[in-house]
């Protein structure tokens, strides 16, 4: 990842690459709209509340998130020696998530909040 670090309750999302062909081999035309989902690659520390404490983030690096269509800001960063477009999304614009442990473990043996042991900010 680049040295782009999200602040407060912002999340950096790598844009999902839509399928280019179907399982049967039909080539799909490119979509004009940005996809409404992607993979979290960086998470801010959380919003500072009036009492000085931080609001805990609900997403972790590696989660697939679904967000409102017009919420993210698109920026171009250098990742692994090449320029890529990523999205900066406010946590409140994220509608749902598929945690990384759910993809890897099919929900077996994990409870809510165990995806990262509370350490989403590494």
Image (tube, rainbow, N blue to C red):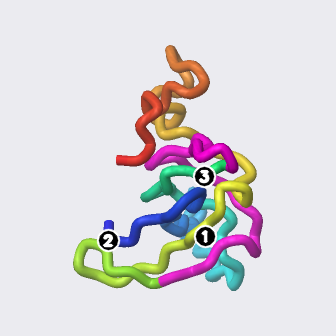
Residue at left 41%, top 47%?
121
- Residue that label 1 marks: 26
Residue underneath mark 3: 48
Relative to 38, say whether 61 is above or below: above
- Along the line of sight, which residue is nearer the eye, 14 or 58? 58
Label 1 Cα crowd, 10 Å radius (few <14 / some 14-19 / many 20+): few
Which of the two discs, 2 and 1, labels the residue nearer the N terminus?
2
**Magenta region:** 50-75
Count neighbours of disc 2 (C-alpha within 10 A) and say few if under 14, some if 14 to 19, many if 20 or more.
few
From the image, state whether disc 3 or disc 2 is nearer to you.
3
- In space, the residues marked 3 and 2 are separated at their CA atoms by 22 Å
First-in-chain label (3 vs 1): 1
Q: CA distance from mark 3 to mark 1?
A: 49 Å
Q: Which residue is painted at 63% across and 60% down in the image?
A: 37
Which residue is denoted by mark 2 in the rendering? 3
Above or below for 95 versus 53: below
């Amino acid at each position: 990842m680049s040295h782009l670090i999200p602040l407060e309750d912002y999340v950096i999302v790598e844009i999902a690459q839509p399928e280019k062909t179907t399982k049967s081999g039909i080539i799909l035309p490119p979509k004009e709209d940005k996809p409404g989902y992607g993979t979290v690659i960086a998470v801010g520390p959380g919003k500072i509340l009036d009492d000085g404490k931080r609001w805990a983030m609900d997403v972790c690096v590696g989660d697939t998130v679904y967000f409102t269509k017009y919420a993210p800001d698109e920026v171009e960063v250098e990742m692994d020696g090449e320029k890529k477009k990523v999205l900066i999304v406010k946590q409140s614009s994220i509608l749902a998530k598929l945690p990384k442990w759910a993809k890897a473990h099919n929900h077996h043996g994990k409870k809510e909040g165990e995806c990262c042991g509370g350490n989403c900010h590494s």
